[in-house]
Every structure is written in C-alpha cells, then in structure tokens.
Amino acid sequence: MNEIELLRELAQETPLPAPAELDAARARLVAAITTDPAAYAAAAARAAVEQPGPSTGQPTGPLQPAAPKPVLAAAKFMYGGAVTSAAYVIAILPFVGSIHGKVLGYRLTATPLTITVVIVVFGLVPVALWLWMARAVGQGRNWARILSAVLFTLATLQLIEGRGVAQVFCAALTWLSGLAAVWLLWRPASSAFFKSARAARSRPPSQISGP
Amino acid sequence: MKRRRGSAADDAAVIESSWLEPERFAVLFDRHAPHIHRYLARRAGRQVADDLVAETFLTAFAKRDRYDLGYSDARPWLYGIATNLVGQHRRDEVRQYRIMQGAVAEPEVPDHADRVAAGVTAQATRALLDAALAELSAGDRDVLLLIAWEQLTYQEVSRALAIPAGTVRSRLHRARTKVRQVLAGTGAAATYEELTTNE
C-alpha cells in the first residue's frame, strides 16, 4: 500500500455529512440566489406571463430573460463611454480657435462659432450612440453588441488621432470603456442571454407559457 | 482535458441554465456539497467546514458566468474554490491535523488482540500522516490531498488550482517523497496494510 492509497483509505473513515448539516449552507445559497438581479427579473417575467393583461386577457408581453451580470456591467461601461465621449468634446473646444488653414485638404472659411457648433453636434453623436447601445444591449438586442464592436473600432481610431493631454486622456478612457464593454458582451453568459432574448422575441404570445 | 457528455443534466448545463434562472444553481449544491463538505471537514474541521462549504458555493454562484462550459464536470472548479478558501484558514487546517493525530477510529477486526493491534497501528499511522501533512508546504498539500482524498486526475487538479500539469506532477512527487520518508522510518504503513487486509 503506497502513501496515496493509505491516505485514501484513512480518509474513508470520515463520513459524508448528514443532510441536516448542510441546511444552513444551502439556506445561505438560496438567500443569495433570491437576491440575485437575474432572479428578480425572472420572477417578474413569470408573473407577467401568469397574469393576463386587463384588456386583452393575453399575457402582457414576451418572456424577456434577465440580463446577466456581464451584460449589466457592459451597459455600465457604455454609460461610462458616453460620459468620456462628452468629456472629449468639451476637451476639444478650447482648440477651436487654433483650427485654421486647411482641414482634410479643404480651405476652412467657417467662423469659430460655426466650427464649435459642428464639433458639438458631431461630438454628441457618439454620446447618443453609446447611450443607445447601452439600452439596446440591456434589452438583449444582438445587433447592438455587433455595432458596439464597430464603435469600439472607431474609438480606437479616435485614440490615434488625439491631440493634447486632455484629449488623449478622454479618448483613452473611452477606448478602455469600449474594450471592457465589448469583451463583456461576448462572454458565454452574455451570448446565452442574447440568444435567449432573441428566442423570446420571436415566440408568438400564444406560445408563451409559465414555467 | 475538456469534455462534454452532452447530457442535459451535466454540471455545465446546470451552470449555463443558472445564468438566466439562478435557482437552478441549487442543483449543483445538492449534487456536490456533501463531498465538498467532507473534503473541507478533513482539512479544516467540521465546524469550519460548515461555514466554508457555504462560502464555496456562494463564491461559485457569484462567478458562475465565468465558468468554462467546455468542462461538463464542475467538481475541479468547486474543489479549487474550496481549496483557496482553506488557504485563508491555514492555521485552522494545521490545528486540525494536530487534533486528528489524537483521534482514533479502530478498524473492525474480529479478534480482540488483532483489533487492539490494528487500532494502535491505525492511530500511529494516522498520527504520522497528519504530522507529515502539517509539515508539507500548502501547495504540495493541496495537490496531494486533491489526488489522494478526492481522486481528481492530474488534469483536474491542474484546472482546480490553475497551475500547469507539470507543476502538479512535481508537487505531488515532492509531497509523496516527504510522506514516504516519514512512514518509511516506522513501517507503520506496511503493518497497517497487513492488519486491514487480513480482516
């Protein structure tokens, strides 16, 4: 008998715990499960299915699965991306006065006020996109995570083009937010959520049934 | 080594379903908690084990979205979490080995004289083993006990402890050598084997 076998044999003398000994641990796990955000959403969805709408007598809507933690975290990073994109616009404004001469090969004749308005308007587009994406991924829209990956690529280009410390800092923050969001959106748990959400949307109301 | 059995009831399927239906995770508890508890009780004592088994599954639940679904068997993952938690109770663990040196559970031997002899030998062997385990480094002990007690493979231990398989082998070799050295001087293992196999 070698030492491994000896250890194994002596270990067999320790009995498995009685079920009652695990009750406290199981209760702690169940408590954690019931307070999990996904459990709340699942319960709410079930309640919506079980209670028909007052006017139609039909379920109130499709059984929308709860967004898992990576998707919720990705949405938060996207909101962060929106904030840093806005900060980027603000950071670029002091440089409006220095924009003169030729831009992209064209002679610039616009006044500083016009340039400011253009920068603000075009600067708000990525902010709006980030907010839109954050909302859409939270709803399980698969196209939103694909578009998010595209936006991340654009943010990478913005990082390369940045001028000045403040701009580069804002662009770097935006890029990092995008990187985190895109990475989280392609985690297996996120993919399961998007797949499940798409299946729920494509299911006709008559096929929706409670668990 | 990754493998999928394809069964709807395998651990990976349970964890995957728990991403959107968290209550499904309780299935994993019911399936593995008794063995995880016994492992923890051996290492840190029953009282500490009660708390650690809860912590193990709470940690696993919190990290379930990071589980690699390529592995159908979640035991190495759970043992890895449990082992990390034991690491935070090293003093409890070493104290447990000291306590176990004094605890005896005599093997059932018909003859009284043999029973006494077997009991004494079992006690001596266990005391020596516990002393040897207490002397091992934490990493060597983790590997040895996961293989000896929980019968995990090298690959499973590698996955549980997030170390290369080569490191598992070298740690196991080192741990076995130390334990063998302790037992070799006394002949306790041979005597124990002889008495228990002659039952």
Image (cartoon, coloured by chain):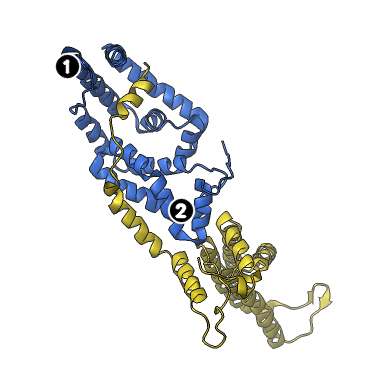
Classify residue B189 by image quadrant: top left
Q: Is residue B142 left or right of residue A168?
A: left
Q: Is residue B34 left or right of residue B91?
A: right
Residue A163 location (% of width, % of height): 65, 67
Q: Looking at the image, which is closer to me, A48 or A64?
A: A48
Chain B tint as drawn: blue
As drawn, B19 above or below B130? below
Chain letter for yellow, please.
A
Q: Earlier in the sequence, mark 2 or mark 1?
A: 2
As drawn, A182 above or below B76? below
The amino acid marked with disc number 1 is Val
**Label 2–label 1 contact, CB within 8 A:** no
Can marks 2 and 1 be said to lie on one chain? Answer: yes
Mark 2 vs mark 1, foreground winner is: 1
Residue A188 location (% of width, % of height): 58, 54
Q: Is residue B169 left or right of residue B52?
A: right
The chain letter for the residue carrying disc 2 is B
Q: Is residue B173 left or right of residue A171?
A: left
As drawn, B16 above or below A207? above
Instruction: Give neighbour class at mark 1: few <14, some 14-19, many 20+ (Cα, 10 Å).
Output: some
Residue A74 location (% of width, % of height): 55, 64
The amino acid marked with disc number 2 is Lys
Q: Looking at the image, which is closer to me, A2 or A57?
A: A57
**Label 2: which residue?**
B63
The residue drawn where x is 57% and y is 62% is: A193
Residue A148 location (% of width, % of height): 65, 66
Residue B116 numbered tag: 1
Quadrant of image for the N terminus of chain A: top left
Question: What is the distance, in whole Å, between disc 2 and disc 1 at their CAs?
Answer: 50 Å
